[in-house]
């Protein structure tokens, strides 16, 4: 086997190495999208989605440039799945109207492209530390649309960068915020179980693994999971998900913690946010400009402590494998490359 040196591009994703980690970027792909669809000189949008604009199914049956709309959605889905979790919610929501888009849908899609125009150079940065895998779960439920489907979102971070994320319309009809949050937490738990199994098979990770911390901003949902009381009025499909989450907690696959809504990194995967929250959530997912990454100075790093029962998953590399791992960077590489091409989803 010929040694080709350090990898530079893998499956269309560029690798950028810095003094304290590695980053993945598709800036070249963003530029191609903007050029292909004529947005090189467009006005810049500060946020990817305007929550004040309501989107509904086009009941007229007359579509507006349906082929072009579907082409743009397809391009954006590939980008959202690869390195841009910040547009996952927008793309997921707009993809629902691909069969018959109207002017309102086009306006929202136009905004996503103009947002990309101003954020071409964003990349996900993974630091060597903290070597902690943690997840965030969130859901949105619109009370005024009784019986409507909510939206689930989750993101898992390692080394300060997102390694797995999803934004999707819930398949179940939920009748309260609690039910919507529980469905989202169940989806998050399923992904956490997969990641737990992946890491348990990596020889450079010390075993046994502690539970993965999953952060949820619904105190009611957390209380229900921790309670062992049985309520006959709870619908069967909700009971099934409740039991599934409790089993993951009991098996020490996950540990559930409360996080405030403003600190929930999964918040932008379920709804449109204002500029300050968009910027904050981007940092939480490790999204930084390429310029910031390449000019990043070496900073003293603090380890995150692992407390028994907290659910925080702090990893260490076996001493005999340190020469292979290069600290903890190899662990970050392994999860990043596996996640970005296999597990990410926005639909």
Image (spheres, rainbow, N blue to C red):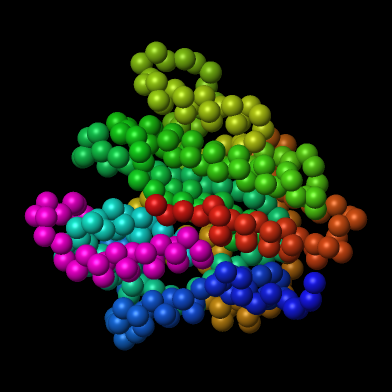
Left or right of residue 30: residue 301: right
Identify the residue at image location x=31%, y=57%. 95
Left or right of 50? Residue 307 is right
Task: Give the percent coordinates (x, y) of residue 127.
Answer: 67, 65
Identify the magenta region: 54-83
> Which residue is painted at 54% across and 39% down in the image?
190
Q: Is residue 267 visible?
A: no
Left/right of residue 130 with respect to residue 61 in the rendered view:
right
- Quadrant where the N terminus lies? bottom right
Please state the horizontal and vertical placement of residue 54, each as a whole percent of the image: 21, 55
Depth check, front residue: 245 or 259 = 245
Q: Quadrant of residue 237?
A: top left
Q: How many numbered circles does the render carry?
A: 0
Q: Residue furthest bottom?
A: 41
Q: Is residue 146 above or below residue 43?
A: above
71 is within the stretch colored magenta: yes
Q: Residue furthest right?
A: 320
Magenta residue check for 199: no
Q: Quadrant of residue 294?
A: bottom right
Q: Is residue 53 above or below residue 29?
A: above
Say if residue 70 shows up in the picture: yes
């Amino acid at each position: 086997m010929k040694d080709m040196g350090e990898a530079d591009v893998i499956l269309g994703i560029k690798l950028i190495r810095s003094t304290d980690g590695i980053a993945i970027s598709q800036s070249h792909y963003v530029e191609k999208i903007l050029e292909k669809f004529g947005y090189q000189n467009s006005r810049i949008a500060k946020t990817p989605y305007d929550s004040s604009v309501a989107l509904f199914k086009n009941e007229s049956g007359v579509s507006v440039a349906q082929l072009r709309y579907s082409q743009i959605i397809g391009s954006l889905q590939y980008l959202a799945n690869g390195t841009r979790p910040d547009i996952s919610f927008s793309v997921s929501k707009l993809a629902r109207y691909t069969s018959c888009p109207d002017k309102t849908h086009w306006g929202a899609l136009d905004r996503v492209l103009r947002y990309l125009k101003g954020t071409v150079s964003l990349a996900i940065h993974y630091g060597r530390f903290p070597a902690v895998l943690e997840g965030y779960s969130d859901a949105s439920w619109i009370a005024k649309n009784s019986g409507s489907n909510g939206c689930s979102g989750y993101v898992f971070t390692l080394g300060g960068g997102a390694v797995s994320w999803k934004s999707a319309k819930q398949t179940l009809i939920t009748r309260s915020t609690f039910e919507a949050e529980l469905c989202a937490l169940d989806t998050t738990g399923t992904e956490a179980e997969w990641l737990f199994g992946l890491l348990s098979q990596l020889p450079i990770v010390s075993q046994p693994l502690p539970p993965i911390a999953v952060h949820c901003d619904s105190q009611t949902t957390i209380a229900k999971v921790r309670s062992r009381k049985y309520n006959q009025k709870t619908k069967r499909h909700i009971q099934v998900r409740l039991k599934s989450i409790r089993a993951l907690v009991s098996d020490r696959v996950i540990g559930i913690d409360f996080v405030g809504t403003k600190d929930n990194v999964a918040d932008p995967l379920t709804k449109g946010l204002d500029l300050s929250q968009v910027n904050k959530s981007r940092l939480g997912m490790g999204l930084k400009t390429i310029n910031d990454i390449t000019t990043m100075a070496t900073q003293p790093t603090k380890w995150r402590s692992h407390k028994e029962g907290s659910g925080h998953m702090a990893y260490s590399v076996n001493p005999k494998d340190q020469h292979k791992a290069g600290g903890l960077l190899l662990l970050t590489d392994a999860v990043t490359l596996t996640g970005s091409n296999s597990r990410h989803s926005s639909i």
